[in-house]
Amino acid sequence: MLAISCISIPTDGNNMNKEVTLPNFLTLLRLLLAPAIFYLIFIGKNQIALIVFILAILTDLLDGFIARKYHLVTELGSHLDRWADKILMASVIFALLLKNQYYAWIIVYTLGIFAFLVGNIYFVRKKIVVSRLSKTMVWLEAILLAAMIYGYVNNYTIILFSVLLGIPAIDYIRKMI
């Protein structure tokens, strides 16, 4: 269990090594995979991009499982996980939108929703509480993005993704009122 719980890194006496956990490392790995997936999609290597995207999604499953099972949930990890999810999803959808030359309005809409969600999560709410609805939407978005990376990019999949992306935003607004 010790090998799973922490990577031993000497620090200057503070408690920083409590934040250097395997789940946080997996989250950082997901952050690093996002630009690689963007690049792979943009140069037309969609099969490789799909494999890397699936690996990134697996890191999301694995980091949460390990963090909960071994009581390694950290504040840093909670913040990084949300950022990693948003950056991964945004990287993939923007690569697909740009590569397939979709209209600017859908890019602006998608950027706006991501900005709203990130702003709401990190600047309005002091504690990160992810609803079951939001988790469900993230997984549906991931499945849809995988299909789109595979080659099913059309107006219907883009609109469906936009709707899935907007549902948590509407839920956050509803809860704020």
Image (cartoon, helix red, strand yellow):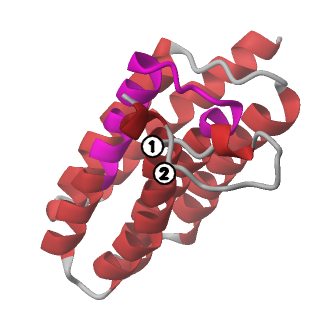
Question: Any mark on residue 25, and which?
Answer: 2
Q: Residue at x 39, y 75 (%)?
A: 36
Whether tag 1 and tag 2 are in contact, CB under 8 A, the answer is: yes
Q: Residue at x 48, y 48 (%)?
A: 27
Q: Which residues are magenta?
A: 56-79
Is 159 drawn above or below residue 52 in the view shown? above
Q: Amino acid at mark 2?
A: Phe
Q: Residue at x 50, y 40 (%)?
A: 6
* Residue 110 position within the rendered picture, expressed as x and y whole percent measured from the top left: 57, 53
Is 132 drawn above or below residue 59 in the view shown? above
Is 101 drawn above or below residue 4 in the view shown? below
* Residue 62 position within the rendered picture, expressed as x and y whole percent measured from the top left: 32, 36
Q: Regarding mark 1 in the picture, which secondary structure is present there?
A: helix
Classify 10 Å Cα crowding around label 1: few (below 14), some (14-19), many (20 and above): some
* Residue 159 position within the rendered picture, expressed as x and y whole percent measured from the top left: 39, 47
Q: Amino acid at mark 1?
A: Leu
Q: Is residue 70 magenta?
A: yes
Q: Quadrant of the N terminus?
A: top left
Classify 10 Å Cα crowding around label 2: few (below 14), some (14-19), many (20 and above): some
Please say whether residue 101 is visible from this viewpoint: no
Task: Find disc 1 in the rendering and name its residue.
Answer: 22
Quarter residue 77 falls in: top right
Q: Is residue 76 magenta?
A: yes
Please say whether residue 142 is visible from this viewpoint: yes
In this rendering, the count of numbered labels is 2
Quarter residue 55 falls in: bottom left
Q: Quadrant of the C terminus?
A: top right
- Helix, strand or loop for the magenta stretch, by majority: helix
**Mark 1 to mark 2: distance in Å?**
5 Å
